[in-house]
Each structure stands twice: as C-alpha cells, then as structure tokens.
Image (tube, rainbow, N blue to C red):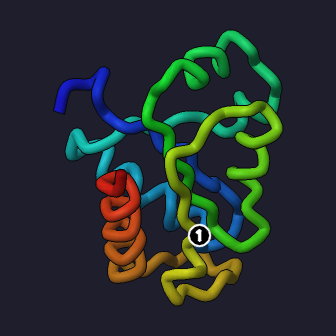
Amino acid sequence: MEPEKMPYVFLCHGAANVGQLSNDAARELFNAGRLRIACVAAVGAHDQDFIAPFRSGRRIFCVDGCPKRCASRTLGEERVPIVASMVVTDLGIRKNHDLHLRQRDIDLVRAGIEDLITKE
C-alpha cells in the first residue's frame, strides 16, 4: 500500500498487558506495510504542529487497551477525528500487569486491528 494511503493508528501504550499488546500487534502490521503508527503522547502534549495534519481528512483509527479509553479521549480533546476505534479488553483479554505477552494474544489483537482498519 502506498504510504500516503495507509491508515494511521493511535494506540494505547499503557503499562498493562493490553497497552503493550496493542503496541506489539500494531508494530507487526506496520512492519507488514499495512498501517502507520501515530503518537498519542504528542497529541496529549498539545503539539499543534503534529496534530494539524490529522485534522485534514486522513484515515485515523484508535486502539484503546481498556474501557478507560485514554487514547480515544486524548484524541477527542484535540478534535482529532477517528474513523473507528476498538478496545483490547473487548476481545476477551483481561487487563493485568503481566508483561510476558503471549503470541496468541498479540495475534488476536492484530486480527482486531486488521478488522478495524478495513471497516468503512
């Protein structure tokens, strides 16, 4: 896929398993040329030079780790339009602080992200 047509995905990068699962799964898709990863921290820091391009019609998706939806809420505060979002715990993965991630959980999250970015 051409880089300018790839969807952008903002991710939870939290210190729990669900945040790290979203990161690992998205990194696999990034390496496969399926998406681009965008930085929630820069949005949270109110970096307008970074945020402005995301208000210009790009396809933006968000992956939250848990029902607190920190990543989605951060994007909402800066009016970054999201096409669709998902929550990792909705996939049946329980949030915990064990960072010994299982590949089957990464695979499940990766499939969820693939479904998310192909919606429209």
56 left or right of 13? Answer: left
Which one is in front, 99 or 85? 85
Which one is in front, 27 or 89? 89
Residue 113 locus on image (x, y percent): 39, 61
60 left or right of 77? Answer: left
User: Residue 67 occupies which quadrant of the picture?
Assistant: bottom right
Residue for point 17% across, 33% down: 1
In the picture as drawn, the residue positioned furthest to the left comes out as: 1
Element type at mark 1 = strand
Residue 52 locus on image (x, y percent): 64, 15
User: Residue 40 occupies which quadrant of the picture?
Assistant: top right
Residue for point 62% across, 61% down: 64
Q: Check the image and report above or below for 49 versus 13.
A: above
Residue 35 locus on image (x, y percent): 33, 41
Residue for point 72% across, 31% down: 43
Which amino acid, by three-letter code, is at mark 1?
A: Val
How crowded pointer 1 is (Cα within 10 Å; few <14, some 14-19, many 20+) is rated as many
Residue for point 60% across, 73% down: 17
Q: Check the image and report above or below for 39 versus 116.
A: above
User: Which residue in the protein does label 1 denote?
Assistant: 87
Which one is in front, 103 or 38? 38
